[in-house]
Amino acid sequence: MMHNHFLLSELLPALSGQLLGKDIAFSKVNTDTRSVQSGDLFVALKGENFDAHDFANKAVAAGAVALVVDRELALDVPQLIVADTRVALGQIAEYNRSFFDGVLFAITGSSGKTTVKEMLAEILCGAGQVLATKGNLNNEIGVPLTLLRIAPCDQYAVIEMGASGPGEIAYSAGLSHPDIALISNAMGAHLEGFGSLQGVVEAKGEIYDGLSSTGTAVVNIDDPHADQWIRRVADKPLLTFGMDSNADINAIDVQILEDGCYSFVVQYGGTSEKVQLKVMGRHNVMNALAAIALTVSAGLPLSLAVAGLERFCAVKGRMCSLSGLNGARIIDDSYNANPGSVKAAILALEELKGERIFVLGDMGELGPEAEKMHREIGQFTAMHNIEKLLAVGPLSKAAVEGFESSNNLATQQAEHFIDQNSLVDRILPRLHENMVVLVKGSRSAGMDKVVTRLTEEV
């Protein structure tokens, strides 16, 4: 639901387009013919392998009352003719955002951004009506679609921003005009598009450029690149978070609980409160600190953040603990992977009791360093006392080689499989109640299918 029912003519100044046909009102914007409803404005996007102009008739048949197109179509509905429909989608989204007078948060980072988004949304539910990015709709199409969902009843908007190359976050932040922006971290993710880690650092920093002069930059002071971001926001209000005692918001007395979840004491502004998380892994303490920093940046109380974090449960595919066959514990961290998030998962697995098995699929988009990075992950796995590494995918073969070159214990083993079925067939009969299996890989590796096989009989 958009902020208002707009007339087509209201969009013309934002679009620099031409209106063919009568001026009518529409209820919301849609880009997918499969979900078009009566009253929608259909934007016909074009990509490398598709052109929605070819399916605009289906949108009209489903109830679309008007179209945004780059050429006139032989359809009996009003049409806004623009030079580029993808650009037009962003312009309409920015126009809708201009009516929102609540607080808009923008979040990016190499890892943790979706968890921070979900944590913050849970916290803000205790303060008012919240709109948050659905799933991973965080790119140059997903961000506009999220902005278009902002409705008059919303008081907070939480926008996740991802990128596979420079300029993409600048575009998303430029449309969103965030009041508060945060980078969770910068790691070696999507290196193919950025060229180097420094390229990632600079591209993530684009999120701060979208802030207004009074907008607040929230910076992870523990990140090695924090100084670069702090210099970038020298003219803006700044709030820092991290384990570093110099951070505005920091954690002390960090403790692991029996189930692998953590508790800690958060310190801010001379006050402190204990937090007990329901999510696994030490890295989630940092994610929680990020969510707390965003909350207090909006002038909301620390107690609200603590209450929300203690309600928060794991997101599917992100360190989600499940019951497996024969009483084994399966940890589903299959949503995505880069070297930093894989190491965080290994550290979380190391802290658990029982026989620990790490199941790894390929990490994607790492560029020419991909094989080297997989080998380093194998070495890291062996050094952190994981009993078995089971890997699948062409790149993950290097992880097995790295593991075998570094394992010091006779009980440590690694094996590479040509496909997921072979891997699952090997591990299923060996599952037992004292075993913990953590499954990790990039989305392109489809490791969620392995999780399904390991848990479907339960």
Image: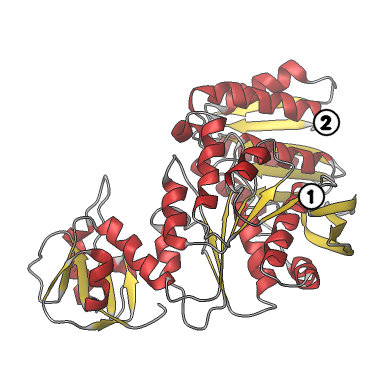
The N terminus lies in which quarter of the figure?
Answer: bottom left
Q: Quadrant of residue 77?
A: bottom left
Q: In terms of secondary structure, where does tag 1 sit?
A: loop
**As shown in the figure, which amino acid type bears the numbered disc 2?**
Asn
Q: Is residue 190 left or right of residue 56?
A: right
Residue holding disc 2:
385
Whether residue 85 can be seen here: yes
**As shown in the figure, which amino acid type bears the numbered disc 1?**
Ala
In this rendered view, identify the residue nearer to me: 190 or 228. 228
Residue at 74% across / 42% down in the picture? Answer: 222
In this rendered view, identify the residue nearer to me: 342 or 208. 208
Which residue in the rendered view is the most extreme toward the left?
74
Which residue in the rendered view is the most extreme toward the top?
405
Q: Earlier in the sequence, mark 1 or mark 2?
A: 1
Residue holding disc 1:
247
Whether residue 316 can be seen here: no
